[in-house]
Image: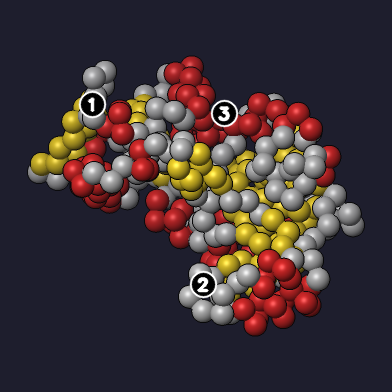
Amino acid sequence: MVLILTDCFDVHADIVVKELEKENIPFFRFDLDVESLKKVYISFENSIWKIKTKDNEISSKQITCVWCRRPFVELSLQEQRYTDIDFKIWKNEWNKTLLGLYNSLKQIPWLNPLRKAYKGENKYYQMDIAKEVGLKMPQTLISNDKRMIEKFAIKHKKILFKLMSQEIYDLGNDDFKGLYTNVISMKDIEKFNETEENPIVLQEYIDKKYEVRYTIVGEEHFVCCIESQQSEKAKEDWRRYDIANTPHRKIEAPKEIQTKVSNMLKLLDLEYGALDFIITPEDEWVFLEINCMGQWLWIEELTGMSISKAIVKWIKDNN
């Protein structure tokens, strides 16, 4: 039986569950949002885990593979504001318990193995692996030294600022903000303090013909062209979604890129990855990052590529 780690809001899981039902593949959906967990019983005795919900029950002895979408307690934006000590203890104890469960399942197939996924999410590590397999990347500086940042900006003239984390921040009054990739100027850098700043990521600006979301499931490759330059809103960062003005279409990656991407997944020891590329006006592929638990459903809906069925095939082959 496949264990699905997700939450009740995850439409990706909804789609895969429907496909699993069509294939008559048994599954246990473990929703890890706060409200769902309030209705879950979990126990560990004699080296066996048992999870019980209103509608289902499973033992760790029944689990044959794991699809890992969202492995820890998922907080809504409003729940992230909670400062109640009892709530913090509740969340932390659930997460520690979940780690115990996952450790007991480490010998079975995972999409993706948890520790390897979190290691692979580290952007510094990604850059080392991308370099090793021969993928071209933008010139990059990660620093909190204002003098080095100024030198980098002078050298490259036009640069981008980005953060390693992609969290949503609470601005109060039910207002939340995500931080996206932006072009920054010397005036912006002048505001940077001489000391006590966190490291930031700066990259040379690379002209785009279009962008690519490159999804791999096992041995299957799904390559999507994102025409971000047709939208003023999405031009610098397509995650500022402007779907109506940003056409998506299926394309074929050059064989050389396919090989390098496959090699990167092998070195990261991952079965799933969602990679982002810039394609330059000269048709050069420039690697930006890989998301080890990245989203894919909008790609499937806009292009017809069957990523969900590839996930089900992986589960079927490894179940």
- Which numbered circle lies on residue 154? none
The residue sitting at 63% across, 51% down in the picture is: 180
- Which numbered circle lies on residue 197? 2
Query: In this picture, is 217 found above or below 151?
Result: above
Left or right, 233 with reference to 308? right
Q: Amino acid at mark 3?
A: Lys
Q: Secondary structure at mark 2?
A: loop
Q: In the image shown, does 184 or 243 lie closer to the viewer?
A: 184
Query: In this picture, is 25 found above or below 203?
Result: above
The answer for how far apart the CA atoms under marks 1 and 2 are is 43 Å
The residue sitting at 73% across, 59% down in the picture is: 183
- Nearer to us of marks 1 and 2 is 2
Q: Secondary structure at mark 3?
A: helix
Find the residue positioned furthest to the front: 173
Q: Position of residue 73 (x, y in %)?
A: 33, 41
The answer for how far apart the CA atoms under marks 1 and 3 are is 30 Å
Q: Tell me the quarter of the image containing the C terminus.
A: top left
Q: Earlier in the sequence, mark 1 or mark 2?
A: 1
The residue sitting at 24% across, 44% down in the picture is: 84
Q: In the image shown, does 299 or 89 lie closer to the viewer?
A: 89
Task: Please give the residue where the numbered disc 3 appears in the rendered image.
Answer: 309
- Nearer to us of marks 1 and 3 is 1
Q: Amino acid at mark 1?
A: Lys
What's the coloring here?
secondary structure
**Residue 64 quadrant:** top left
Q: Position of residue 162 (x, y in %)?
A: 62, 59
The answer for how far apart the CA atoms under marks 3 and 2 are is 45 Å
Q: Tell me the quarter of the image containing the N terminus.
A: top left
Task: Please give the residue where the numbered disc 1 appears in the rendered image.
Answer: 39
